[in-house]
Image (cartoon, rainbow, N blue to C red):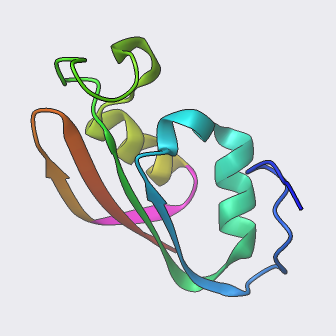
Amino acid sequence: MTSGVDDLPFAADSLDAVFSTMFYHEFAGEEALDEITRMLADAGRLIIADWAATGSGDHGPPLAERFSGTETANDLRDAGFHIEHTAVRPGTFLLIGELR
């Protein structure tokens, strides 16, 4: 079965955590975050590790397809997450958000 991130086959409030490893730049957007928040239980966590817009572009997707850690954290806050942890390196970032 194949599904887009904006229409996943999980029941509402059924997941404690969602992980995205080096893939957030492919689905970032309000529809996808709405779907993730629908699936997460109260206090569920979204963990994102991805290529940073501040990188060199030597590895990973083109810089134009990437987001900064700050931009991603703001998007998560707008979707109802409290940012618990942020780590930004030159080419990557890690965010952990808890759904409130």
Q: Is residue 43 found left or right of 73 in the rendered image?
A: right
Residue 79 placed where, x, y %? 58, 53
- Residue at 49% of width from left, 45% of height from top? 23
Which residues make up the magenta segment? 79-84
Residue 11 figure quarter: bottom right
x then y, percent, for residue 42? 60, 86
- Image point (19%, 24%), residue name: 55
**Image: 75 above or below 82:** above
Residue placed most toward the observer, 94 or 61: 61
73 or 15: which is nearer to us? 15
| Horizontal side, residue 12 vs residue 14: left or right | right
Q: Is residue 5 left or right of residue 26?
A: right
Residue at screen point 71% across, 54% down: 34
Residue 66 position (above or below residue 32):
above
Q: Quadrant of the N terminus?
A: bottom right
Relative to the observer, which residue lies in front, 20 or 28? 20
96 lies above or below 28: below
Q: Is residue 75 left or right of residue 95?
A: right
Can you name the residue that lies furthest to the left here?
90
Magenta segment, prevailing SS (helix, strand or loop):
strand
Q: Position of residue 65 (x, y in %)?
A: 46, 20
Q: Say which quarter of the image contains residue 83.
A: bottom left
Q: Using the image, determine if residue 55 lies above or below residue 11.
A: above
Please name the residue shown 47% across and 51% down the image: 76
